[in-house]
Amino acid sequence: MVEMTVAESKAALAVFGERLDLAERYVAHLATSGIERGLLGPREVPRLWNRHVLNCAVVANLIAPDAAVADVGSGAGLPGLTLALARPDLRLTLIEPLERRVVWLNEVVDDLGLDNVTVVRTRAELAADEVTADVVTSRAVSALDKLARLSIPLLHGSGEMLAIKGRSAADEVEKAKKVIRKLGGRETEILTVGDELLEEPTTVVRILVAP
């Protein structure tokens, strides 16, 4: 079990509520088989809660009830599995091209009994034919201009893209403006979430897509 600080424990309870035990099991998977199979580096173990799981899970506050969410480049389930744990009302499709990651994700989904998650092995640019989402999420996939090309088609003309970004968010938005507009992005904003829970709030680029 990965120990939490008092602040992390308080934040995790606020985010996951009665499903905190499932979140703890997910973190245990990350800290064991996730490291063993190369989904995360061993140095990340002490930072799993704050830097990874809680950093992603607070994004759930931005998503409307009962939304269909596609998570691009899901990897170790960040943010996809954290959103599924925090919000059982959401329907998650995790899009991941690498087989070893897909196998691991399915193992974790089965172990946690997450009936609101489907894992799809495909490249994001090929997924639009089989995935339609209200919201597309991502974290640490690529620069925003390329990420918009991968994500926005999954919305099929209407919805929003939520990309977890770092301090370069404003620069990425500036560089991607033309691409976003061409793809149907009507409004782009940079938000911070988790201010009241996390030492370092999460930065999210939100792009509203409409006809």
Image (cartoon, rainbow, N blue to C red):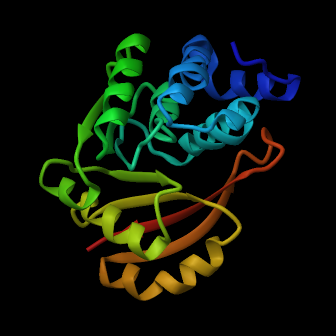
The N terminus appears in which quarter of the rendering? top right
- Taking the spot 78% from the left edge, 18% from the top edge, the residue there is 3
Q: Based on the displayed image, in which of its 4 quarters is residue 47 positioned?
A: top right
- Taking the spot 46% from the left edge, 36% from the top edge, the residue there is 77
- Taking the spot 39% from the left edge, 49% from the top edge, the residue there is 73
The C terminus appears in which quarter of the rendering? bottom left
Residue furthest out toward the bottom: 178
Query: 206 and 38: which one is in front?
Result: 38
Residue 106 left/right relative to 190: left
Residue furthest out toward the left: 129
Q: Where's residue 148, x and y in %?
A: 38, 70
Vertical relation: 161 (above or below) 120: below
Residue 80 left/right relative to 201: left
Q: Where's residue 152, x and y in %?
A: 32, 65
Q: Where's residue 54, x and y in %?
A: 66, 36
Residue furthest out toward the right: 6
Residue 80 left/right relative to 1: left
Q: Based on the displayed image, in which of its 4 quarters is residue 10 positioned?
A: top right
Q: Where's residue 66, x and y in %?
A: 36, 35
**Number of numbered discs visible in the structure rendering:** 0
Residue 67 left/right relative to 34: left
- Taking the spot 47% from the left edge, 85% from the top edge, the residue there is 177
